[in-house]
Amino acid sequence: MAESIHGHEVMEMMMASEKGFTKSSLKKAIYQKFGEAARFHTCSAENMTADELIEFLEAREKFVDAGEDAEQGFTTDPSKICDH
């Protein structure tokens, strides 16, 4: 099994891109950076697919609006990344 990637790495990738995402475009970016077979973990969950990680992050309110225009989608913020 491939090494598990922490969800923080995905959030850091989002911040570095300086653009908004939709769920679909975030999934595509995750696949491009980490591969389609990648598995993810967080401080409280493990062995998640990209889809499961996106749902997990959304449910825990880790996403913030990317701008006033709804078409800009969402991003994340350093304050949303736990430090433990």
Image (cartoon, rainbow, N blue to C red):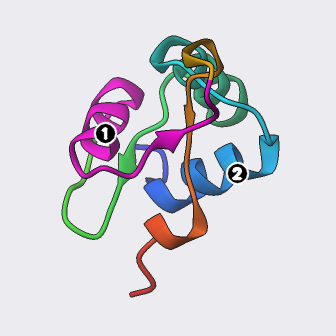
Q: Quadrant of the C terminus?
A: bottom left
Classify 10 Å Cα crowding around label 2: few (below 14), some (14-19), many (20 and above).
Answer: some
State the SS at label 2. helix
Evaluate whether residue 27 shows in this view: yes
* Residue type (three-letter) at the residue carrying disc 1: Glu
Q: Is residue 31 left or right of residue 38?
A: right
Query: Dot 1 corresponds to which residue?
Result: 58
Q: Quadrant of the N terminus?
A: top left
In front here: 9 or 69?
Answer: 69
Which residue does the image show at 24% across and 52% down from the upper left?
A: 60
Can residue 64 be found in the magenta stretch? yes
State the SS at label 1. helix
Which residue does the image show at 21% across and 42% down from the upper left?
A: 59
Expressed as whole percent of the image width and height from the top left, the position of residue 19 reads: 76, 33
Query: Dot 2 corresponds to which residue?
Result: 15
Expressed as whole percent of the image width and height from the top left, the position of residue 48 reads: 29, 39
Q: Is residue 9 left or right of residue 43?
A: right
Question: Total label count?
Answer: 2
- Choose the circle earlier in sequence order: 1 or 2: 2
Residue range highlighted in magenta: 49-68
Which residue does the image show at 46% across and 19% down from the upper left?
A: 23
Classify 10 Å Cα crowding around label 1: few (below 14), some (14-19), many (20 and above).
Answer: few
Note whether 15 is above or below 69 in the view shown: below
Expressed as whole percent of the image width and height from the top left, the position of residue 83 reads: 45, 85
Q: Is residue 34 left or right of residue 58?
A: right
